Image (spheres, rainbow, N blue to C red):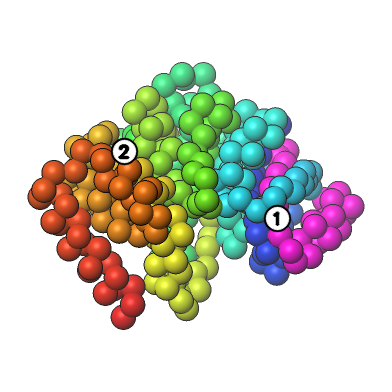
Amino acid sequence: MNITIFTPTFNRANKLPVLYESLCRQTYVDFQWLIVDDGSTDNTEQVVGAWINESIIKIKYYKQPNGGKMRAHNAGAVLCDTKYFVCVDSDDYLTDDAIEVMEKAIPEVDSDGTKSGIILRKYLSDDDNKLYDCGRKYITLHDLYASGFRGETTLLFKTSILRKYPFPVIDGEKFVTEGSAYDLIDQEYKYLFISKPITICEYNPDGYTLNLLKLYRNNPCGYVNYYYQAWQLFGSQVAKQHAYMYTFFIKDKKTRKEYRKKDFDFKTKVFGYLRYLKKIYITKR
């Protein structure tokens, strides 16, 4: 067995059946599903328990106190006992041949210490499923987007690399953007890129921008650290301005003061503040 499908979940008992059914339809069946329940208060445990008893696919279930997706993801990487790990969110599902596609591609990266895994595509259920040619067989995630790619990806990782680069954890916050770890992985490794969608997702647009504003306000330090790191790694002045912008969302004055001791020049502060005003305006429209 090579692949673990990992799903972090919180109160998604009503969403998980679609993913489960897609896993039961897989054309390649030698895989396992690892679910880390991030403190759900609904009937997720009972729903998953019934599936475990069905024994159609191999399922491992672990429940932890609510701490946010990054803590659940870090726990999943530690609990995973296969060489490869792919995160599939609780409101997404897989094409019937998804695991077969990944299994067939693994030999192209398996013995290469410079490759972290495989980039595949994710698409909305109403997308037209067009292929994308980035011009390279192996590429970093950052360079893929720099080449003009738009949309979301599904990433199959060597589990050892995710353990080497866990998501940062900040006291009092429950969210960090995935780029916080992925940008660091890009400094050392490349992925095999396959322009085939294997994950299908459906977004509910209702309240999406309001949820974004809530994320900013509840997790500002994570955003500051991510954008500041992006400036350090890639030299992006826009990223540096975003880092300063998110300091305005830090409620604790002492913490805000500490974060503003970072290397923010006057121009960055001015444009960062303007970006903050724009962000508030857009999310409140």
Q: CA distance from mark 1 to mark 2?
A: 30 Å
Q: Which mark is residue 39?
A: 1
10 Å neighbourhood of mark 1: few (<14), some, or many (≥20)? some
Quarter placement of the N terminus: top right
The reply, left or right, for residue 2 in relation to residue 268 is right
Q: Nearer the viewer, residue 124 or 179?
A: 179
What kind of element bears circle 1? loop
* Residue range of the region highlighted in magenta in the rendering: 30-56
- The residue depicted at 13 percent of the width and 44 percent of the height is 265
- The residue depicted at 23 percent of the width and 68 percent of the height is 277
Residue 26 appearing in the image: no
What kind of element bears circle 2? helix
Q: Nearer the viewer, residue 193 or 181?
A: 181
Q: Which amino acid type is shown beneath numbered disc 1?
A: Gly
The reply, left or right, for residue 270 in relation to residue 112 is left
Residue lying at the far right in this picture: please name it: 53
Q: Position of residue 244 (x, y in %)?
A: 25, 51
Check contact, mark 1 vs mark 2: CB within 8 A. Answer: no
10 Å neighbourhood of mark 2: few (<14), some, or many (≥20)? many
Q: Position of residue 239 (x, y in %)?
A: 24, 47
Q: Position of residue 161 (x, y in %)?
A: 51, 28
Q: Would you place residue 114 above or below residue 176 in this image?
A: above
Q: Would you place residue 15 above or below residue 227 in this image?
A: below
Q: Would you place residue 211 above or below residue 162 in this image?
A: below
Residue 24 appearing in the image: yes
Q: Position of residue 272 (x, y in %)?
A: 20, 56
Q: Which residue is mark 2?
A: 229
- Dividing the picture into quarters, in which one does residue 229 lie? top left
Residue 275 within the magenta-colored segment of the rendering: no
Q: Which amino acid type is shown beneath numbered disc 2?
A: Gln
